Image (tube, coloured by chain):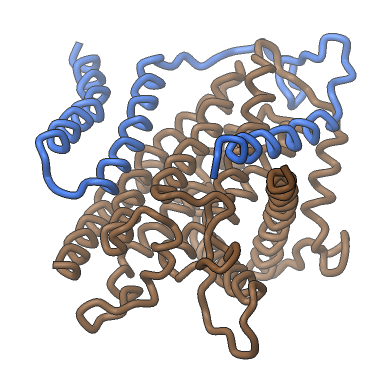
């Protein structure tokens, strides 16, 4: 597979799906805005959540994918492999430790 | 030049076929679930209701789209299209038919495609977590939080289970992995050796596609559809299509890693259609199994899910790694 074929494989489905999406109906309202899709007129509200949660989640996904690469490609136990696993494990436990400290305060 | 045009036509055809297969998988799931619950299931659109998912998709595409206040529309629209694209691109990597004289291989095939496929599968879950946070509404936010907790629980046991298949195959290429379940190691069929991994992956895929008993992010009686409460019109149509594609592609991943993919006996004459037949038969058998479990088990609470994955399936997948290491010793 060359670069042109890879580009075709990435771009063609994206173009097809974007065209299909654009065929869908847009809002008829002037502003196109409602507080909620259900039609309830309660004021808009957002439940507070910690941005740290999202950071942790991003790290976890990164960890997850890197772990996959390491597990699948490791031919033998090496210093790089062990160091990567230790670093990744520390990343994984960062958030629970933070939460625990928060609770103590 | 002709080669690229032919490849482009193949990509477009494959995309359309995958979308129709996803609709077929949804119809199969709904029809079977209907029978399990003593209902008829879809029956009006097309013969035995087979066109119902397509009718639902067209209906949603024609419904007015309501965007809640404070929504970042660009990102919601982008994620709706990107999620579907991600699953279709994943399907290019699954080996179904042989191209030329080779063994069955994916439309895109390279050494390490198994890692790439699973990385894409992990990324697809992000669509369900990021999108609800873009709405200023309590239900999607709670649904997204639950989805994220679900993701943190099923991901590691499932990847460890899939890693055991790769270790036993000794290759990260999908076309090599499909050959493994049909072989024997130390007189034991590999398919038996990998039974714990199969169980963990099946449950992991069910959690990934949010089918019962793992539909906690959208729990309709508690959260009013949770993460998808503020989706409407074409956005909802595309996210439903994404869920259907995940059901089909998730089942196809199980078939590829554990059931020999498209390989099977060819009694009359050899041909590519046998590969397609075996692949579809096995994939729909896995969907049948998923539906049967989904129709028989009540929804778990989030703490029960965490306990199931971290305390039961995680040790099981680690035991599986040791079984595999013993087998290849």
Quadrant in the picture for residue A62:
top left
Do we see residue A84 in this rendering?
Answer: yes
Q: Is residue A57 above or below residue B219?
A: above
The outermost residue toward the front is B1
In the rendering, at what x and y percent does residue B259 appear? 45, 70
Figure colour of chain A: blue
Residue B82's image quarter?
top right
Residue B53 vs residue B287: left or right? right
Q: Is residue B224 visible?
A: no
The C terminus of chain B: image quadrant: bottom left
Question: Drawn colour of chain B?
Answer: brown
B27 relative to B215, above or below: below
| Residue ID at (76%, 37%) | A16
Residue at 25% x, 59% y: name it: B316
Foreground pick, B240 / A19: A19
Q: In this view of the protein, which residue sits in the foreground, B234 or B43?
A: B234
Could you tell me which quadrant the N terminus of chain B lies in?
A: top right
Identify whether A38 is placed above or below B220: above
Which sits in the foreground, A66 or A103?
A: A66
Q: At which x and y percent is residue B142?
A: 50, 28
Residue at 18 percent of width and 16 percent of height? A104
Q: In this rendered view, identify the residue nearer to me: B294 or B113.
A: B113
Is residue B236 toward the left or the right of residue B245 in the image? right
């Amino acid at each position: 597979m060359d670069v042109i074929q890879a580009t075709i494989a990435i771009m063609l489905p994206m173009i097809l799906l974007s065209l299909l999406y654009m065929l869908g109906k847009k809002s008829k309202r002037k502003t196109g805005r409602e507080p909620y899709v259900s039609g309830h007129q309660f004021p808009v509200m957002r439940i507070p959540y910690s941005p740290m949660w999202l950071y942790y989640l991003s790290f976890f996904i990164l960890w997850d994918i890197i772990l996959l690469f390491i597990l699948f490609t490791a031919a033998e136990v090496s210093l790089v492999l062990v160091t990567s696993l230790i670093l990744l494990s520390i990343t994984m436990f960062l958030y629970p430790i933070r939460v625990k400290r928060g609770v103590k305060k | 030049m002709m080669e690229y045009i032919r490849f482009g036509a193949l990509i477009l055809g494959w995309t359309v076929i995958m979308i129709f297969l996803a609709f077929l998988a949804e119809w199969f799931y709904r029809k079977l679930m209907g029978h399990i619950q003593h209902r008829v299931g879809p029956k009006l659109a097309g013969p035995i209701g087979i066109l119902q998912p397509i009718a639902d998709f067209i209906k949603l595409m024609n419904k007015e789209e309501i965007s809640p206040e404070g929504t970042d529309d660009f990102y919601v629209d982008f994620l709706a299209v990107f999620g579907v694209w991600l699953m279709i691109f994943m399907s290019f990597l699954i080996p179904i038919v042989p191209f030329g004289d080779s063994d069955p291989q994916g439309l895109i095939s390279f050494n390490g495609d198994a890692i790439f496929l699973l990385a894409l599968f992990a990324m697809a879950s992000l669509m369900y977590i990021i999108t609800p946070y873009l709405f200023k509404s309590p239900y999607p936010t709670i649904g997204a939080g639950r989805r994220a907790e679900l993701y943190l629980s099923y991901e590691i046991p499932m990847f460890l289970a899939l890693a055991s298949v790769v270790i036993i195959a000794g290759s990260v290429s999908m076309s090599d992995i499909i050959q493994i379940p049909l072989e024997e190691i130390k007189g034991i069929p590999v398919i038996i050796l990998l039974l714990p991994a199969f169980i963990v992956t099946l449950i992991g895929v069910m959690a990934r596609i949010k089918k019962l008993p793992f539909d906690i992010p959208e729990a309709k009686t508690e959260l009013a559809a949770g993460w998808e409460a503020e989706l409407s019109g074409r956005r909802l149509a595309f996210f439903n299509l994404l869920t259907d594609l995940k059901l089909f592609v998730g089942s196809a991943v199980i078939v590829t890693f554990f059931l020999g993919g498209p390989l099977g006996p060819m009694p009359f004459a050899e041909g590519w259609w046998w590969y397609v037949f075996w692949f579809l038969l096995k994939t729909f058998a896995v969907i049948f199994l998923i539906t049967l479990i989904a129709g028989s088990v009540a929804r778990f609470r989030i703490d029960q899910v965490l306990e199931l994955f971290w305390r039961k399936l995680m040790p099981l997948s680690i035991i599986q790694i040791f079984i595999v290491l013993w087998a290849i010793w």
